[in-house]
Amino acid sequence: MRVRFEGVSKHFGSHAALRDVSLDVEPGECLVLLGPSGCGKTTMLRLLAGLERPDAGRIWIGDRVVNDVEPAQRDIAMVFQNYALYPHFTVAENIAFPLRARGGLAAEEIDRRVRAAAARVALQTLLDRRPAQLSGGQQQRVALARAIVRNPSVYLMDEPLSNLDAQLRLQTRTELKRLHKELGTTMVYVTHDQG
């Protein structure tokens, strides 16, 4: 799905987080936004996700301007820096959460999708565990599987590897590249890590 910013600006009080930003992400492309903290990378993701509204300009997902479209209606999945897992849910329940919240799928279909997403990120043997029983890398893979299970039009990744050690960060970055190639879905990836 194509993503486009046309002259987008966003201010927080007197601070300009974004000033007249225009960019185009082609369908299936992975755009990496690299820069130091405070330069507007996460603001761009939040605008694209619908968690913030632009002060000026237009944001497109596909052929639709989404400035006034609610986050749930944008067909995006976001992976956060802190994983945002539910501690009282198992791995399987965490992965299934967006499907159950949206409704409309039979339990068997949810189970099939959860197992398929878990297999993509090598979590098949951990489905009955809770987040506290997982390493940081495993928790990150749960967050990725939860995004994958939705099969969205666009993935938004906000510093998803920053809480991992250097070796695991390198390994997970390689996994993300493989996943992007396999899925062929548009991805916007924010990082300050030039590694």
Image (spheres, rainbow, N blue to C red):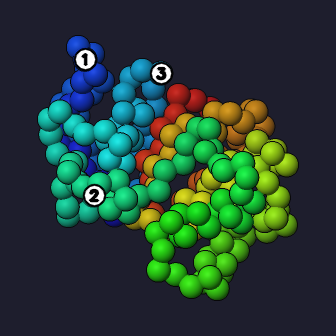
Say the numbered circle drawn on residue 43. none
Q: CA distance from mark 1 to mark 3?
A: 18 Å
**Which one is in front in this view, the residue at disc 1 or the one at disc 2?**
1
Where is residue 141 drawn, in percent x and y?
Answer: 69, 53
- Foreground pick, 89 / 9: 89
Describe the element under mark 3 as helix, strand or loop.
loop
The residue carrying mark 1 is: 13
Where is residue 187 drawn, in percent x and y?
Answer: 45, 53
Q: Earlier in the sequence, mark 3 or mark 2?
A: 3
Is residue 129 in sight in this rendering?
yes
Q: Earlier in the sequence, mark 1 or mark 3?
A: 1
The vertical placement of 182 against 30, above or below, is below
Q: Is disc 1 in contact with disc 2, using a CB cutoff of under 8 Å?
A: no
The residue carrying mark 2 is: 61
* Amino acid under disc 1: Gly
The residue carrying mark 3 is: 37
* Amino acid under disc 2: Ile
Residue at screen point 85% across, 49% down: 133
Relative to residue 63, is residue 83 drawn left or right? right
Is residue 116 in sight in this rendering?
no
Describe the element under mark 2 as helix, strand or loop.
strand
Q: CA distance from mark 1 to mark 2?
A: 27 Å
Relative to residue 12, is residue 182 drawn left or right? right
